[in-house]
Amino acid sequence: MKSLNPDSCSPSHNFTMTPGRTFDVVYVEDGLDPNRVQEILLRVQPKEVIPIGHYKDVFCRPHQDVVLQRQAPALILAAKRAPFFYPGAPVCQSFGNEHFYYTSLAMNCLFDCEYCYLQGMYPSGNVVIFLNYGDYLDELNHLLTHHPVYLCLSYDSDLFPIEHLSGAISFWLDVASTKKNLRLEIRTKAAPHHLRPLPNVYYAYTISPQPVISAYEHKAASLTQRLASAAEAIANGCKVRLCFDPMILVPHWRAVYGEMLSQVLSIIPIEQLSDVSIGSFRISKDYLKILRRIRPDGAIAFYPFVLKDGYYHYPDDIAAGMQQFITQALVPRLGAERLYFDQDSL
Ligand code: SF4
């Protein structure tokens, strides 16, 4: 069995992708492992390094310009405090797993999706990377003594663009390789290569039409790149999930999503997918309010949504129509039992 070193950040991962942008400014919280910090600073080569007492001193400052910061974020290196795992939100798909958790290994993202709910959730657009994975592992081991765990790693950030700094994916793949009662989902809008196949790890690709990517998913991989990465992962024996979620109501959406489906069906061996999730855009009432304030020119946020149970959705008939459009294309090759939906819209 491979030993785990919770304090190691050596990028021993066996996948590659182009590293993301560098950071001009790095804030370093007190008390971190100096070797890890030094290793990261050597990779980043920032113009300025600023010691801080607690990451919230910087991250939670009032009156930050989130949109501007997301375009050129600072990096904050920090240690997370408990709790390390949170129960999955009702609007997130559990894929039939009873004990569904997510964790926050980093906060914010090098991609800049206009509809990203993180903009409504965090007071800052700067990127935090937590380094104390050993503490997470202690809590996970405790959870696993009670029941199996389905854990989503990348709800609060896309981890692939920062993997060359954090080593987070590599670390958690090593953990998954030793624990049969742990299932991981790693969701991405990147296009990584040489992914490591493990029976309990799902690589989940968010799939959007290229016009949606070009208009709203800034800096993320193109549709062609994502599909090529997913096809390679399937060929290498990885479990791959495609997420047509969030579907965005754009003009002529049937034509736009139809063109995307043609590309998907021609590149991906659909029968070999683990499963597929389908859902239209939805966002909590509070986050939408903030999104409208900070992106007043954003086209997505100003749709006249319907409010249900604290979340804004497209009207039921529109959301259901969008989901059925994808479903009808995939069912003949995948089977209905491997499709999962945003139930609120059906
Ligand atoms: S990839 Fe995900 S986390 Fe990153 S900006 Fe887009 S929606 Fe937000």
Image (cartoon, helix red, strand yellow):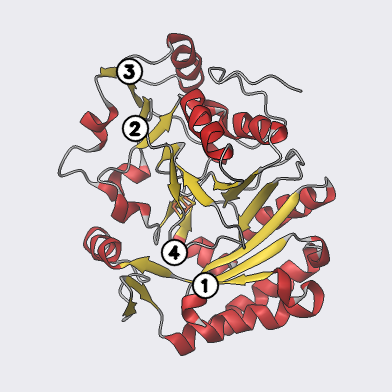
Counting residues from the N terminus, which is met first, the one under dot 4 or under dot 3?
3
- Say above or below: 213 vs 158: below
Between 219 and 64, the one lying in front of the other is 64
Question: In this image, 29 relative to 184: left or right?
Answer: left
Q: Mark 3 and 2 residues: CB-CB less than 8 Å, in contact? A: no
Residue at the farthest front position: 146
Counting residues from the N terminus, which is met first, the one under dot 3 or under dot 2?
3
In the picture of the structure, the residue carrying the numbered disc 3 is 49
- Would residue 252 be seen by someone viewing this image from the given angle? no
Separation of marks 1 and 3 at Cα, in angstroms = 43 Å
Q: Nearer the viewer, mark 1 or mark 3?
A: 1
| Image coordinates for residue 133, horizontal then vertical, percent | 50, 27
Q: Nearer the viewer, mark 1 or mark 4?
A: 4
Question: In this image, 299 relative to 262: left or right?
Answer: left
Question: In this image, 97 relative to 285: left or right?
Answer: right
Separation of marks 2 and 1 at Cα, in angstroms = 34 Å
In the picture of the structure, the residue carrying the numbered disc 2 is 74
Residue 297 falls in which quadrant of the image? bottom left
Q: Amino acid at mark 3?
A: Val
Question: In the rendering, which numbered label is found on residue 90?
Answer: 4
Q: Amino acid at mark 1?
A: Asp
Q: Residue at x 77, y 75 (%)?
A: 335
Q: Mark 4 and 3 residues: CB-CB less than 8 Å, in contact? A: no
Separation of marks 1 and 4 at Cα, in angstroms = 10 Å
Q: Residue at x 30, y 16 (%)?
A: 30
- Say above or below: 249 vs 101: below
